[in-house]
Amino acid sequence: MRIDVVSIFPEYLAPLDLSLVGKARQSGLVDITVHDLRDWTSDRHRTVDDTPVGGGAGMVMRADVWGRALDEVLQPGATLVIPTPSGRTFNQREAEDLARRERIVFACGRYEGIDGRVARHYRGADYHVEELSIGDYVLNGGEVATLAMIEAIARLVPGMVGNPESLVEESHGAAGLLEYPVFTRPTTWRGLDVPEILLSGHHANIERWRRDEALERTAQLRPDLIAALAKSQGLSARDLRALSDAGFENPS
Ligand code: JB8
């Protein structure tokens, strides 16, 4: 997989040298290049922005500069990801989808964002263009959102995670639920005991306990996920009984 990032703050992407993503880059599994948008400016001040047409606060990133950069960096068949708070929300499904692409280019905006014609132009030129938000809050630019998305995508690339078992468990263990709590030694810490069932060695009981913990935690914190699972037949009769025993309303 090849990933390019275009930004006016290339140093913001330095964490991509670290940890699992850094190792994947060193092993050649993921090839990441960070570009400085100002390399495609043509004036003495290396200007990338201008005032908004129609008025309003702040500055807008110029289509001409982005066009020169993307004409050079985007290869045929590539996906263009534009982080923006007005995009569709990036989630695990999007990460799985993007992990299957051969080439992705992230265009990191700043100020009030990138001239709206840039996304339209590359869509019209038959690129996959995804305007994506990482959540309902506003950052100062697309760089941190890009870091989050690259980390979520890269760990799904086959051969990437040190322990492939952990990915398998994630996808079919408690699909659509929050994770159950985890513990390690010592079994007593500051007067708090690890749940006894986890020390029993009874794997079927442990699995059931973990499923119940995941269900309860999800019902408490993310009732929207319980409703979605109920709608898609993702809850067994046993799951429904566990939720009812824990005092939650029947989600159907
Ligand atoms: C200017 O919150 B965000 C985000 C905010 C931004 C830009 C891109 C993304 C560009 N502000 O994800």
Image (tube, grey):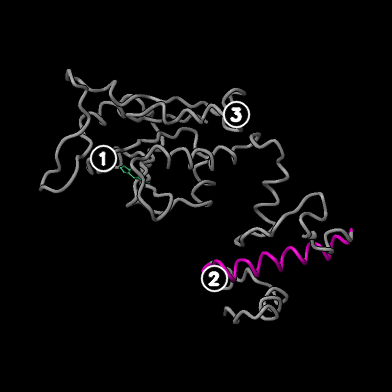
Q: Is residue 118 left or right of residue 22?
A: left
Prevailing secondary structure class for the magenta stretch in the rendered image: helix
Ligand 1 within 8 Å of the CB at mark 1: yes
Q: Disc 2 marks which residue? A: 223
Q: Which residues are magenta?
A: 201-224
Q: Position of residue 39 (x, y in %)?
A: 29, 20
Residue that appears at 51% across and 46% down: 95
Q: Disc 1 marks which residue? A: 111
| Rendering quarter of residue 236 | bottom right
The amino acid at mark 3 is Ala
Q: Is residue 243 or residue 200 the one in the foreground? A: 200
Q: Position of residue 201 (x, y in %)?
A: 89, 58
Q: Choose mark 2 or mark 1, whichever is in front.
A: 1
Count of marks, rendered view:
3
Q: Is residue 83 or residue 187 the one in the foreground? A: 187
The numbered mark, 3 or 1, whose residue comes first in the sequence reads: 3
Please, which residue is most extreme toward the right here? 201
In the displayed structure, 151 sits above or below 228; it is above
Query: Could you give the CA–CA distance between mark 3 and mark 1, rounded to whole angstroms?
Result: 32 Å
The amino acid at mark 2 is Pro
Residue that appears at 54% across and 70% down: 223
Mark 1: few/some/many CA within 10 Å (<14, 14-19, 20+): some
Please, which residue is most extreme toward the top here? 44
Q: Choose mark 3 or mark 1, whichever is in front.
A: 1
Quadrant location of the C terminus in the rendered image: bottom right
Give the quadrant of ligand 1: top left
The numbered mark, 2 or 1, whose residue comes first in the sequence reads: 1
- Tell whether label 1 touches label 2 (CB within 8 Å): no
Q: Which mark is residue 24?
A: 3
Q: Which mark is residue 28?
A: none
Q: Position of residue 54 (x, y in %)?
A: 10, 48
Residue that appears at 47% across and 38% down: 147
